[in-house]
Image: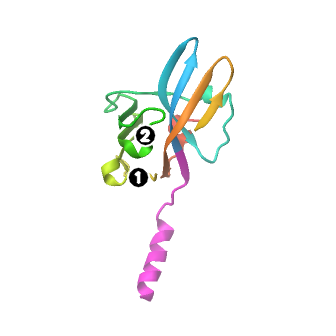
Amino acid sequence: MKFTVLATALLATFLPAAQADFDIFKVDHKKGGFVLESWQIWDRNRPNTCSSVFDREFFPDTYDASGSKTGVRCRGACGFLGPTRDITQLEMNFRHKAPVYHWTIYKDCNYGMYGRNDYDCQRKITLGLQSESVHGYRKFHCKTSFTAAKILGL
């Protein structure tokens, strides 16, 4: 028993802990009469401002996020108000070149987030200005060693 506790404590000191959290938002960006549906990622521990939502990278909805195609492919209840529990797959390809940021969340795997790095993901914000607006609906909160700032190169 003492050996198990000691071995676990020793092993824990060498394993990297999750260093950050990020949220995945489904957003609509309205400008000049056009509405663009897309996705954004945000760090939980960084303050957001009304102007920062316009500077943040938008990742497009796509039918194919494999290989070199960046964007987010969603299956299931992917609309703004669709319940997150009804999303069956969410594939995110934020960067296809090294370092690769490409993961998929699967409902049938307890919403685990899987990709080349094998990190796990756990399970209405309105931001904007008068002439231009961005509305986001958080879909997932991910616990990983990657931050939105790191993925976006901020």
Question: Which amino acid lies under the numbered mark 2 shown in the image of this protein?
Answer: Pro
- Which secondary structure lies at badge 1? loop
- Label ID, residue 127: none
Label 2 belongs to which residue? 99
Choose mark 2 or mark 1, whichever is in front: 1
| Residue for point 40% across, 29% down | 70
- Span highlighted in magenta in the image: 1-22
Question: Is 16 contained in the magenta span?
Answer: yes
| Residue for point 69% across, 34% down | 49
Q: Earlier in the sequence, mark 2 or mark 1?
A: 2
For this rendering, which residue is in front, 143 or 137? 137
Label 1 belongs to which residue? 119
Left of 32 or right of it: where is 10? left
Query: Which quarter of the figure is the N terminus placed in?
Result: bottom left
For this rendering, which residue is in front, 43 or 82? 82
Where residue 43 appears, x then y in whole percent?
Answer: 58, 44
Question: Which amino acid lies under the numbered mark 1 shown in the image of this protein?
Answer: Tyr
